[in-house]
Image: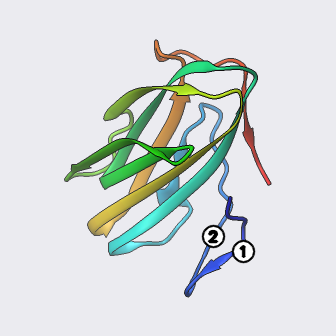
Amino acid sequence: MPKAGDKVGDREWKTIQASNNSVFQIDRSINVDGEGVSYLAFLVNADGKSDARIAVGVDNGCRVFLNGKEILFFLEWGGVVPDRQCVDIQLSQGQNLFLVKVSNGGGPTGAAFRLTAPDGGPLEGVRYVVE
């Protein structure tokens, strides 16, 4: 798991906080304008195996990995539309590592991610790990 301040080439990992509704919005946290790629990594602790849904909206495409397995890939032009793509997942008991690659084809970049119960309601029994 990367930590704030870790460097990859001339780029540095930064810590961002999820909002109260478990949304990560990277457009407010990074300053990328034009073609490029951004990454988001976060850990979620689950009290037990949990059915969940990840809802994603990005500008312009993304790949989402859960515990090393790709669970979502899409490429769509246009701005960030929250919950544009949703996929049902199963969280393992204990730590679950999400890695998200966001691709931008021009202009400002952005992404919104949230975890919910499969019906879109609050997801119980999970905690985000902030290190």
Disc 1 + disc 2, Cβ < 8 Å: yes
Element type where label 1 sits in the image: loop
* Residue plotted at (52% across, 67% down): 30
Task: State the residue in front, 66 or 114.
Answer: 66
Q: Residue furthest left?
A: 77
Classify the position of the N terminus by image quarter.
Answer: bottom right
Residue drawn at x 51%, y 56% is 26
Q: Residue at x 71, y 20 (%)?
A: 48
Q: Which residue is mark 2?
A: 13
Which amino acid, by three-letter code, is at mark 1? Answer: Gly
Left/right placement of residue 66 relative to residue 20 reads: left
| Amino acid at dot 2 | Trp
Tell me the residue that label 1 is attached to.
5
Question: In the picture, which quadrant includes the C terminus?
Answer: bottom right
Find residue 3 and report its horizontal and vertical position in percent.
Answer: 72, 65
Q: Residue 103, percent across and down?
A: 33, 62
The label shown at residue 104 is none
Above or below, comparing residue 53 to residue 36 in the picture: above
Q: Quadrant of residue 93?
A: top right
Q: Is residue 51 above or below residue 104?
A: above
Sort mark 1 into few (<14), some (14-19) or many (20+) by Cα contacts within 10 Å: few
Q: Few, some or many C-alpha atoms within 10 Å of disc 2 (few <14, some 14-19, many ≥20)?
A: some
Identify whether 67 is placed above or below 27: above
> Vertically, is 99 above or below 14?
above
Left or right placement of residue 110 versus residue 66 in this view: left
**Residue toward you, 109 or 45:** 45
Q: Earlier in the sequence, mark 1 or mark 2?
A: 1
